[in-house]
Image: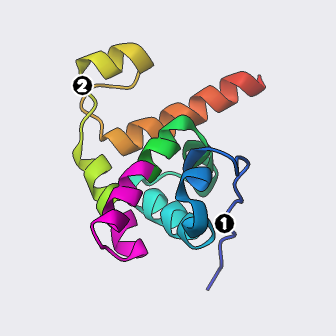
Amino acid sequence: MTSTTIPVTQNEAWGYWGTMNEHANAAWPLAMNAVSDATGQPLDSVRIFLDSRHGRHFADEVQNGLFRGLPLADAINAATQQWMGWKIGRQTSKDYGIPRGLPYLTGFVIHCEIIDESLAA
């Protein structure tokens, strides 16, 4: 059995980590695995997404679940399912270059990785 190391946030002040406040330590590995499992994307790509402004919006949805009384893991799973249920529409495809019809979560994880790679080049 191999163990995979969860990449640490590179944005403690903002993104998913900063938005999760006192829940950040517990919420980070849960979200990393939930998003990676749902999208099929590697943990390094998920880290880039969660550290982005899109990750902050994802955290907002997790916080909504916590406000509704869901336990942390359930709130993360509910947010993941919701974002996977949304599809990239015409305007979002035009604005971000993400293929139309792709699950929202998958599209933005991939988008954030592409942007990160283009900034590093």
Decide if residue 46 is in sight here: no
Q: With 75 as the anchor, is 14 left or right in this view?
A: right
If the image is split into quadrants, where does the N terminus sit? bottom right
- Asked if 88 appears above or below 20 in the picture, the reply is above
Residue positioned 54% across, 36% down in the render = 53
- Residue in the foreground of this view, choosing between 49 and 12: 12
Span highlighted in magenta in the image: 60-76
Q: Secondary structure at mark 2?
A: loop
Residue 74 location (% of width, % of height): 34, 72
Reading the image, the residue beneath label 1 is 6
Residue 109 location (% of width, % of height): 49, 41
- Residue in the foreground of this view, choosing between 47 and 117: 47
Q: With 16 as the anchor, is 57 left or right in this view?
A: left
Assign the magenta stretch its main secondary structure.
Answer: helix
- Residue in the foreground of this view, choosing between 49 and 71: 71
Reading the image, the residue beneath label 2 is 89
Residue positioned 53% across, 68% down in the render = 27
- Asked if 79 appears above or below 94 in the picture, the reply is below
